[in-house]
Image (spheres, rainbow, N blue to C red):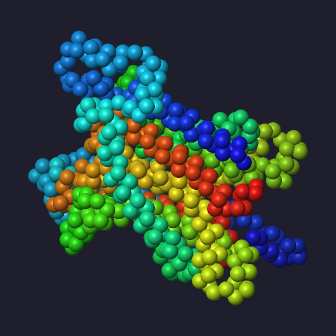
């Protein structure tokens, strides 16, 4: 892991590598993972610059060009109300990017502290948190999200209106909040289990025992010593999780619970184009393939990270 | 050991009660008053009040919950309030369940029969292009959503080449089952392949495999008799976990292919906000999932003698 270098004075200078540097070095050799990283980066860059990249607005209709096949003016054709499919896909990256980041943050905010507490304190704290996780696991995910979304939507929209953000409520941002709350509440148990396992195995190691011996406080041990060491395995779970979140958002929107038109969501787009798929299958297939490619990318990235973290998996 | 199983066994009804409580609460406070749904927009307050009283919706929440649980214990899950208005949820589930079970059985068998051999091949050719190809397929299998795969396959096989029917249901011996079963099998296949490969790679490093090779056993015997058996043990856990996911996958697949199963029932209930059906389905899935995991844990001891001793 370290390189020795002879200097003029004859002493050996050790060049250390950080854990992350080592991870990156191994990841770079894995071509599918690098491709995944590239597509993932592309998603967020596109989302950031969507207004400049998309030739038309996401709800811009041209009733003179309804159901057009692909042409120079409309590279992927238009849908039944004359909206450019390419522009809608590009605007759709915003929904995917925004939802994936916020839901991941919510999941982390819930899962990491709860997992750390469960692993560190053990006893009834552990039992309570892990039983809660069990219940959430046993719940059929999609149905649970359906109930959450259906239940929180009215209260979120009354709350948003009460705070005086009527414009926000009208423009469909409530749908985003509903999706984020629903997916955020369901996604944390997996992370909590992972962090708990990490903390349990790290807790008995010498550097933690040492930290305790010199009188480091519980919080310091948890956040300065335990968590940083649990981060690399967490990165695998996050990467795989993002693919799943984007998929869930699309499924929810497809089922009519998530983002609703005219919000540009790939799932809602696919569902509303189902009706025309006999005559224009590309209206379904193109957004579908874009969605699949993005999920594919995050899964490849997660796989690559996993292999880079556990190199022994590669040796027979 | 016995105490552990007893505890696990007692946890199941508790889990179901909690699941029922959460679902019921969410349904209770959720939008879509069943009376409103039934009567539509222009209602006579007197009629509303009478209906609420007749259905017991004017009673306090704990009483409603208790009476729901009490009736559910005797197999009464209420009646549908929208599409199948008036029909008991239990009979609806009873009618639609067999179709879903058959479909899931076929796709499950398909997933195992393709997934496990693929995983063995990938492990044997570890690091080669064959391995990489199989693993790419696996990642693809868990990445392509059902609602994309179904249209794409239908387009290719039913429209372009016209070799398979685009949908419908005629039992498991009809060609109509091929497309939906393949769509449903892809996810489980990917999971089985990945798990078999990981398990085989792990087992290949064990001493007993080296011993088996050293004493001159044929490679075939080493792989199938010594390595595979041990590599498959963790697979049983995965099967338990997947049961919940399998039912969910059928929602969109059955809707797309027009198959009269639980998925179609659920899909309609979702859109129509038919709560009694959705609550009943949730309880059914949670119960199946909990029971499957319990059985897996019990079966683990029989599959792996090393655990029994611990």
Horizontal and vertical percent for residue B146?
Answer: 36, 57
Q: Can the viewer see residue A68?
A: yes
Horizontal and vertical percent for residue B41?
Answer: 20, 23
Does residue A195 appear to the left or right of A182 in the view shown?
right
Horizontal and vertical percent for residue A272?
Answer: 24, 49
Tell me: residue A24, above or below residue A227: below
Does residue A255 appear to the left or right of B195 in the view shown?
left
Q: Residue at x 61, y 42 (%)?
A: B9
Q: Which residue is drawn at 81% across and 53% down?
A: A205
Q: Can the viewer see residue A57?
A: no
Tell me: residue B86, above or below residue A192: above
Q: In which quarter of the image is residue B196?
A: bottom right
Position of the C terminus of chain A by quadrant: bottom right
Q: Quadrant of residue A206?
A: bottom right
Who is closer to the viewer here, A22 or B9?
B9
Q: Which residue is drawn at 16% across and 49% down?
A: A81
Tell me: residue A138, above or below residue A270: above
Q: Which residue is drawn at 20% across and 71% down?
A: B162
Position of the N terminus of chain A by quadrant: bottom right
User: Furthest-left residue in view?
Assistant: A64
User: Furthest-top residue in view?
Assistant: B46
Horizontal and vertical percent for residue A191?
Answer: 59, 48
Does residue B12 appear to the left or right of B46 in the view shown?
right
Who is closer to the viewer here, A166 or A118?
A118
- Give the tally of numbered discs: 0
Who is closer to the viewer here, A279 or B35?
B35
């Amino acid at each position: 892991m370290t390189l020795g270098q002879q200097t003029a004075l004859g002493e050996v200078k050790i060049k250390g590598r950080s854990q992350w540097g080592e991870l990156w070095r191994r990841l770079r050799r894995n071509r599918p993972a690098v491709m995944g990283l590239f597509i993932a980066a592309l998603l967020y860059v596109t989302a950031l610059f969507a207004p400049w990249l998309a030739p038309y607005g996401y709800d811009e209709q041209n009733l003179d060009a309804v159901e057009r096949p692909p042409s120079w003016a409309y590279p992927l054709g238009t849908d039944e109300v004359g909206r450019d499919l390419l522009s809608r896909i590009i605007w759709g990256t915003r929904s995917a990017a925004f939802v994936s980041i916020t839901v991941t943050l919510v999941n982390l905010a819930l899962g990491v502290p709860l997992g750390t507490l469960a692993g560190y304190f053990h006893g009834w704290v552990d039992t309570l948190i892990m039983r809660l996780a069990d219940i959430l696991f046993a719940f059929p995910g999609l149905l649970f999200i359906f109930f959450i979304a259906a239940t929180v939507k009215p209260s979120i929209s009354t709350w948003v209106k009460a705070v005086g953000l009527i414009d926000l409520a009208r423009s469909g941002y409530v749908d985003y909040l509903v999706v984020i709350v629903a997916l955020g509440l369901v996604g944390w148990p997996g992370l909590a289990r992972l962090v708990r396992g990490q903390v349990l195995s790290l807790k008995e190691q010498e550097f933690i025992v040492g930290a305790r011996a010199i009188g480091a406080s519980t919080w310091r041990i948890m956040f300065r010593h335990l968590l940083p060491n649990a981060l690399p395995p967490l990165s695998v779970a996050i990467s795989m999780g993002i693919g799943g979140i984007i998929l869930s958002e699309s499924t929810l929107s497809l089922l009519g619970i998530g983002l609703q038109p005219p919000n540009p969501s790939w799932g809602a787009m696919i569902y509303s184009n189902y009706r025309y798929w006999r005559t224009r299958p590309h209206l379904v297939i193109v957004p579908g393939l874009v969605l699949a490619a993005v999920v594919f990318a995050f899964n490849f990235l997660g796989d690559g990270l996993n292999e880079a973290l556990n190199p022994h998996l590669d040796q027979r | 050991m016995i105490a552990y199983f007893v505890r696990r066994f007692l946890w199941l009804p508790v889990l179901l009660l909690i699941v029922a409580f959460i679902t019921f609460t969410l349904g209770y406070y959720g939008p879509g008053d069943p009376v409103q749904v039934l009567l539509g927009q222009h209602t006579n307050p007197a009629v509303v009040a009478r209906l609420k009283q007749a259905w017991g919706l004017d009673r306090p929440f704990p009483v409603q919950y208790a009476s729901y649980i009490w009736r559910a214990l005797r197999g009464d899950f209420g009646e549908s309030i929208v599409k199948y208005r008036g029909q008991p949820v239990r009979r609806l589930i009873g009618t639609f369940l067999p179709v879903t079970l058959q479909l899931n059985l076929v796709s499950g068998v398909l997933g195992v029969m393709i997934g496990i051999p693929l995983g063995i091949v990938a492990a044997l050719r570890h690091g080669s292009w064959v391995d990489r190809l199989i693993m790419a397929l696996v990642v693809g299998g868990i990445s392509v959503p059902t609602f994309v795969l179904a249209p794409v396959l239908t387009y290719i096989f039913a429209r372009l080449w016209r070799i398979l029917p685009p949908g419908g249901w005629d039992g498991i011996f009809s060609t109509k089952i091929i497309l939906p079963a393949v769509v449903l099998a892809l996810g489980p296949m990917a999971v089985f392949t990945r798990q078999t490969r990981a398990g085989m790679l792990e087992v290949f490093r064990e001493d007993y495999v080296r011993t088996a090779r050293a004493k001159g056993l044929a490679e075939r015997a080493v792989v199938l008799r010594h390595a595979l058996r041990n590599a498959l043990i963790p697979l049983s856990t995965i099967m338990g976990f997947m049961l919940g996911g399998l039912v969910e996958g059928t929602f969109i697949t059955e809707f797309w292919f027009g198959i009269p199963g639980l998925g179609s029932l659920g899909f309609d209930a979702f859109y129509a906000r038919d709560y009694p059906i959705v609550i009943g389905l949730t309880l059914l899935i949670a119960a199946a999932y909990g029971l499957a995991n319990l059985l897996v844990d019990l079966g683990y001891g029989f599959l792996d003698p090393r655990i029994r001793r611990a």
